[in-house]
Amino acid sequence: MTQSLDEITVVAPHFKRRLSGVTSTVIQLVPEQRRQGLGILTLGPGLPDHLPKMRWKQLPGLWKKPRTGTGRVWHARRNNEMLAGLVLRDVLRMPLKLLFTSAAQRHHSRYTRWLISKMDGVVATNAKSGSFLKVPHTVIRHGVDTDLFRPAMETDADPATILPEAMRDKHLIGCFGRVRHQKGTDLFVDAMIALLPDHQDWAAIISGRVTAEHTAFADQLKSKIAKVGLSDRIHFLGEVDDIKPWYRRLTLYVAPSRNEGFGLTPLEAMASGTPVVASDAGAYAEMIVEDETGKVVPAGNGEALTAATQSFIDNPARCAEAGQKARRHVVENFALEGEARALADVYAGLRANRKVA
């Protein structure tokens, strides 16, 4: 059913079909923004059917101003979405304000810097990302839905029933995300090979997509695991339809990325009552309270990752205590409601022609 644009004040384009961190953000954030009364629609492929969408044929409707205010906000999160906004605003003269959210922690290309310079407002997802921006910006950290990502309850079904029988009753360590070098999956596997032989009551699971270009990488990891006889203790789940029950089933989560934009998985794990060992990639170091909700190690440092992980699996009771603190920390500091409210203030400022910085 096509929704009228009369009450719509924000358009969130999504110009990518494959699941990504940006996709996860949009999937969680837009429903919360709607619950808070914001008139927002998504535009583009790769999003689930339950999200509110505008259709491509409705684009000419953006020439007409909404019922309230003087125009709409086009909230881009990728280069192609910024470019589309520029065409709509500057070529087709649609009454739009352009907002870009940057999660990248690297020096932007000349092209990206040019696009960003044309935006009416810029948001960085964390202080480190903001340090690479050459324009005024607002830091708004991502949040997670703490109702969806929650600790386990007695009524929850145990997802571990699909695991090999030898793993089902063990403490589980998880590493979730696309299986590739950038995500540090090999560092996690190396840590598990070093630790699991001396910790017989623990097992490890890896969940995430293996794309064609990274198949050889994944196959090498599986071969390495088989050679040391741990195929029944380190299990590849593949890409699962619903990751939330697995976070609840974990005793410890590990995020070993070498490079990230923001990275939601540590927040999702902590909201689920699971402590986290993470690299300092992305915004991980800004999420974790050292030695209380988890530990942070230098990105790419396998020895440090192994040592930090061992400090938890040597003491499962410590994991339980840290998991409780992690849940409280996320609820108090990273709830999705806070991100939605902060963005609403930015949208309102742009629509009122106030400078956003």
Image: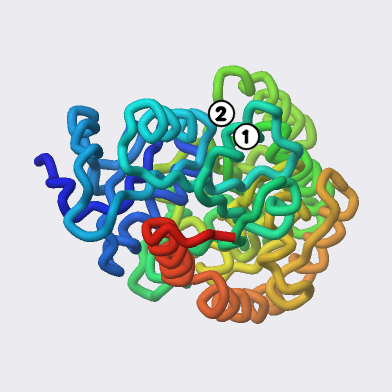
Which residue is most to the right?
303
SS at badge 1: loop
Q: Which colour scheme is used?
A: rainbow
Name the residue carrying label 1. 179
Q: Residue 157's spot in the image, x, y percent?
A: 36, 62
How many labels, in total? 2
Circle 1 crowding by C-alpha within 10 Å: few under 14, some 14–19, many from 20:
many
Pick the quarter of the image with the C terminus.
Answer: bottom right
SS at badge 2: loop
Q: Is residue 93 above or below residue 121?
A: above
Circle 2 crowding by C-alpha within 10 Å: few under 14, some 14–19, many from 20:
some
Residue 146 vs residue 62: left or right? right
Pick the quarter of the image with the N terminus.
Answer: top left
Residue at image position (62%, 80%) is: 325
User: Is residue 170 something that shows in the picture?
Assistant: no
Which residue type carries mark 2? Val
Q: In this orientation, which residue lies closer to the viewer: 60 or 160?
A: 60
Q: Is residue 150 above or below residue 24?
A: below
Query: How far apart are labels 1 and 2 at the CA level?
Result: 5 Å
Residue 171 vs residue 242: left or right? right
Q: Residue 277's spot in the image, x, y percent?
A: 73, 60
Which residue type carries mark 1? Val
Q: Do the residues labelled 1 and 2 touch (CB within 8 Å)?
A: yes
Residue at image position (40%, 74%) is: 153
Q: Which of marks 1 and 2 is nearer the N terminus?
A: 1
Residue 169 vs residue 149: left or right? right
User: Is residue 261 something that shows in the picture?
Assistant: yes
Q: In which quarter of the image is residue 7?
A: bottom left
Q: Which mark is residue 227?
A: none
Q: Which mark is residue 210?
A: 2
Q: In which quarter of the image is residue 319?
A: bottom right
